[in-house]
Amino acid sequence: MMRPLIQEILTTHTPESLVEQLRGERGVVLLRSALFDSPQARYSFVAARPFLTFRSFGSRCEVTSSDSQLSTLNSQFQFGNPWHVLDALMSRYELLDEIDLPFPLGGCFGYWGYDLKNFTEPKLPRRAVNDLELPDCHVGFYDSLVVFDHRLGKTCIVSTGLGADGSRREERVREQAEFWSAVLTDEP
């Protein structure tokens, strides 16, 4: 069984400066801890370049996979309950039997909008006007991320090698680790 890579790296970057360094990359996400004295707020996470994105507009669901080697995006559309489509995607990419860590090895990050309530509580009135034309849901599936441990002052690259087809490859682990190493060693 392939294990995820967890590699400590020396960097002068903060979560914010890393996000600034990633300007122009697809799907940059920052989950920032604010309460450094709290044990629950020990970690901050930065992710970029999702291997898959999911967006829903009502019952129209768009799943876009990316091939980093070919720099291509491939979108497919399906109609139905976005919660069911998302649940199927999440079960496809679940990493079973992994080591127990206090932080994620990757994951599904994004936002779930208020209008998704229509699929769980269909009797509630629909009064909202879609004046912003934003998706009801927009999430990315990430196979790698950078973990900032504020308590210990350490930074780690985490890479699982997971791809859009659900397989895990050593080549992808190395590719993502090299990407993060290059970004983290550039001065902020």
Image (cartoon, rainbow, N blue to C red):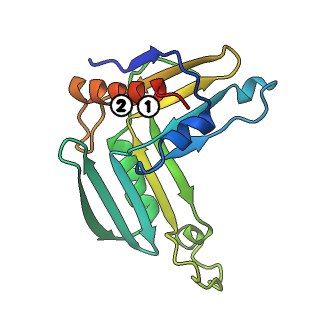
Circle 2 packing at 10 Å, graded few (<14), some (14-19), many (20+), is few
Seen in the picture, residue 114 relative to 95 is either above or below; the reply is below
Amino acid type at circle 1 is Val
Which residue shows up at 33% across the image and 45% down it? 51
| Left or right of 62 in this view: 153 | right
Where on the picture, by quarter, is residue 118? bottom right
Inter-mark Cα distance, 2 to 1: 6 Å
Which residue shows up at 44% across the image and 15% down it? 7
Dot 1 corresponds to which residue? 183
Q: Dot 1 lies on which element?
A: helix
Amino acid type at circle 2 is Phe
Dot 2 corresponds to which residue? 179
Seen in the picture, residue 72 relative to 172 is either above or below; the reply is below
Residue 173 is situated, as x and y percent measured from the top left of the image, at: 30, 26
| Left or right of 146 in this view: 42 | right
From this viewpoint, which residue is outermost toward the left?
A: 70
In-front residue for pair 154/3: 154
Whether residue 149 is visible: yes
